[in-house]
Image: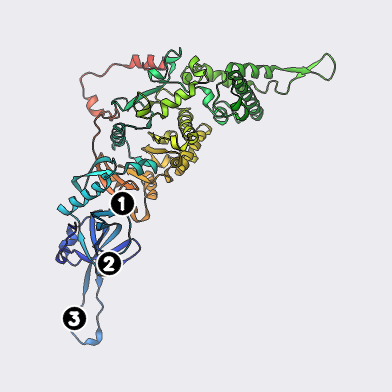
Amino acid sequence: MTLFDYKSEEAIGTVYSVDTGTVIVTVSDVEHLRSLQVNRLVVLRSSKAGQHLIGLINKITRKALAESIDEDSGEDVPEDITVVENIIRVVLIGTLLDMVGTTPNVFRRTLETVPEIDANCFVLEGERLTKFMQSISKSLQEGKQPLSLGTYTIDEDAEAWIDGNKFFQRHAVVVGSTGSGKSWSVARILEQVAELPNANAILFDIHGEYAPMRSDGIQHLRVAGPGDLDGSKNLDDGIVFLPYWLLTYEEMLALLLDRSDQNAPNQAMVFSREVTSAKRSKLEEEGKAEVLANFTVDSPVPYSLDTIMDRLIYLNEERVEGAKKGTTKAGDFNSKLSRFIQRLDAKRKDRRLTFLFGDPEHCMNYEWMPTLCTRLLGSTGQQDKGGVKIIDFSEVPSDILPLIIGLVARVVFSVQQWTLKENRHPIALVCDEAHLYIPARTEASAVNEAAVNNFERIAKEGRKYGVGLVVVSQRPAEVSRTVLSQCNNYVAMRLTNAEDQAVVRRLLPDSLGGFSDLLPILDIGEALVVGDCSMLPSRIRIEEPKTKPASATIEFWDEWSKDKASEGIADAVEYMRRQSKS
């Protein structure tokens, strides 16, 4: 049975003009005009039988036009004659086909035809709207395991589904001001991912707010802090060490080198030479002849930083034979490595960098990296733990946070890249608070640069290797433009900042630019969903997750109104001193 069985008398107007994807409709009855709303759906008769075009009302206008008068007619006419014109502008978003094969009412986001002039236009509402939304949901569910976000704002009886394949493989953006419901949305999505038998995703949790999320498909990991310095805990305890030898040469220099130092080129060259030599020694010790023949300074091979330090100190103090017999002179690098050595020594002694320079014995084993990568990239079906990994970075110092998150992302991408195609299992990286470590180029420091490069490469090439990105931020204006431009799905919640609104507006298709005008007036938990994953641009009320993240805004006035305040300042000072809350 056809879904749109409209009768001609139900038409609100007729097509006046047609552009590529925009239609102007004239509305004869002012009562019809009053009942219309911007961003509501309408149906237009197609020039092809068995097809109806679906459009979104973009603008409603009522204007008065001066009537032209034929002065030669000789008729008595009033001095002021005006004609009122009621028009609506409609953006075409897709086609509903009455039948495709044996399947009735199939919606497609294509425009094979455009409406003819004087074609009837009808409002999509009531029971027809519900059936239309249900037909969209049905088409998404058939043969797939779709992703549910909540319900449509225009029809709360219809559940809002999106295509999980397209959402992750074509990258996604979730944006919204503080308190708009971003964390709910992310939690809602991850809960459903975790229920899949072979789920595989990593969430970068910057503030530990996703700690309450618990299920069989979710595992929690924490980057090691100062309290883990003894190295007694490991991956089995949910503690992640990311030893310095996982860093590339450029990443190590970003961490250690002061590029304003006049001796920086010498320091970089010597460090590269000594690291290469130390890795060669380790490979010879392990008997890895094939790796030895092709390794580079960036190859993830364990090496001793003590050996590097001893060599740097030796070269910094080295004296060689002078021109005259029995005399000595300063070596080529004498006194030129002092600042580099001091910076390296300071980093090694910084207890906050336990995860990087703590050197637990198990992390220096050549066979340790496959264990780490199995935990990071293993799906639910490949390990005993859950396939959704929530990694808590809250104890990582903010000044090197971009470098460390970029390191994890690079390791994941590199392993996926080198995995044989038939063995590759897709993985999604969910980047919470992305503006902190994927900043726009104008705001990128030397430490940030490496992280930005890693994420931009994933955004450009990730789909080929089964790596999807979900970028979550309250400040899209501060996130890398390159990364955002590669994302084809947008979940935009309330945004009040004009710069952030402008970024989202630029990301949307030109025909839907006006859709973004809703951003500042969305309710908490409401989102505009646009992109490849959604059958049509929609305003959706996100359903609350089963477990809410610990990100609720503190109620200032209510807390101040209590008779007694919480007491924890002394404990906080002690936590700050020992750099750990545990």
- Label 1, label 2: how many angstroms apart (C-alpha)? 27 Å
Nearer mark to the viewer, of 1 and 3? 1
Q: Residues within 10 Å of mark 3 (few under 14, many from 20)?
A: few
Q: Secondary structure at mark 2?
A: loop
The reply, left or right, for residue 373 in relation to residue 121 is right
Determine the image quadrant of residue 49: bottom left
Q: Above or below — where is 565 with respect to 133?
A: above
- Name the disc covering residue 47, or none: 2
Disc 3 marks which residue?
77
Q: Which one is earlier in the sequence, the residue at label 1 or at label 2? A: 2
Which part of the image, by quadrant, shows the N terminus? Answer: bottom left
Disc 1 marks which residue?
515
Nearer mark to the viewer, of 1 and 2? 2
Q: Residues within 10 Å of mark 2 (few under 14, many from 20)?
A: some
Residue at the image position 28 percent from the left and 61 percent from the top: 89
Q: Amino acid at mark 2?
A: Ser
- Label 1, label 3: how many angstroms apart (C-alpha)? 44 Å
Residue at the image position 43 percent from the left and 33 percent from the top: 436
- Name the disc covering residue 454, or none: none
The reply, left or right, for residue 192 in relation to residue 285 is left
- Label 3, label 2: how many angstroms apart (C-alpha)? 41 Å
Q: Secondary structure at mark 1?
A: helix
Q: Above or below — where is 109 with respect to 451?
A: below
The reply, left or right, for residue 458 in relation to residue 312 is left
Q: Amino acid at mark 1?
A: Phe
| Closer to us: 383 or 19 | 383
